[in-house]
Image: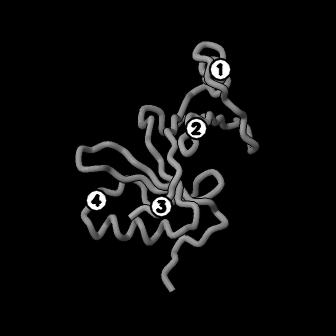
Amino acid sequence: MIPQPFDAAIVFYVTDIARTERFYRDTLGIPVKREDGPEPFMLSAQIAPNFQMVFFQLEGKIGSTPAVVFTIHDGGIDDIVARLVEEGVTIVTPVSEAPGGWSADFLDPDGFGLGLWQPGDKPRSLKA
């Protein structure tokens, strides 16, 4: 269902991004990087070749993370979400604007939150 290969990220919504940066960098020794964008900045940490941690300061979603998010490099998020709906998957957040692109959230059979993200410059549907 999710095009291969893909990247995955664990996404955290935090209340204080500077405090989070200090904790992961100074306390845990994980090299975090400030990403370009509007304030408050976001952080990322490359954990493995296709796996990263991402941190956003976002008050509205505190407690709903961490979440595993799969990156769809070539687009088609609308098609994937439509297929999930056909399979009876619970969609938590329909395709919505997200930093740098589009995202959607859904639940696995045990209620674990998963997400999809695709770059904004890729088509939302690949159907002709």
Q: Secondary structure at mark 4?
A: loop
| Front of the two marks 3 and 1 | 3
**Residue to which mark 1 is pinned:** 25
Q: Please name the amino acid that badge 1 sits on.
A: Arg
Residue 23 point in image, percent of width and height: 60, 17
For residue 109, which numbered disc appears in the image?
A: none
Which tag, 3 or 4, sits closer to the chain's start?
3
Going 51% across and 35% down the picture, which residue do you hit? 12
Residue 74 in the image: state x and y as whole percent: 58, 67
Q: Earlier in the sequence, mark 4 or mark 1?
A: 1
The residue located at (60%, 13%) in the rendering is 27
Give the camera-side residue of 7 and 44.
7
Q: Is residue 73 left or right of residue 94?
A: right
SS at mark 1?
helix
Secondary-structure class at tag 3: loop
**Mark earlier in primary sequence (3, 1):** 3
The residue at which mark 3 appears reads as: 4
- Per the image, the residue denoted by label 2 is 54
**Residue kind at label 3, given as amino acid type:** Gln
Task: Please determine whether, in this image, residue 45 is positioned above or below residue 85.
Answer: above
Query: Which amino acid type is shown beneath numbered disc 2?
Result: Val
Q: CA distance from mark 3 to mark 1?
A: 31 Å
Check disc 3: other Cα within 10 Å, few if <14, some if 14-19, many if 20+: few
Mark 2: give few (<14), some (14-19) or many (20+) Cα within 10 Å: many
Front of the two marks 4 and 1: 1
Instruction: Measure how far apart labels 2 and 4 are at the Cα level.
Output: 25 Å
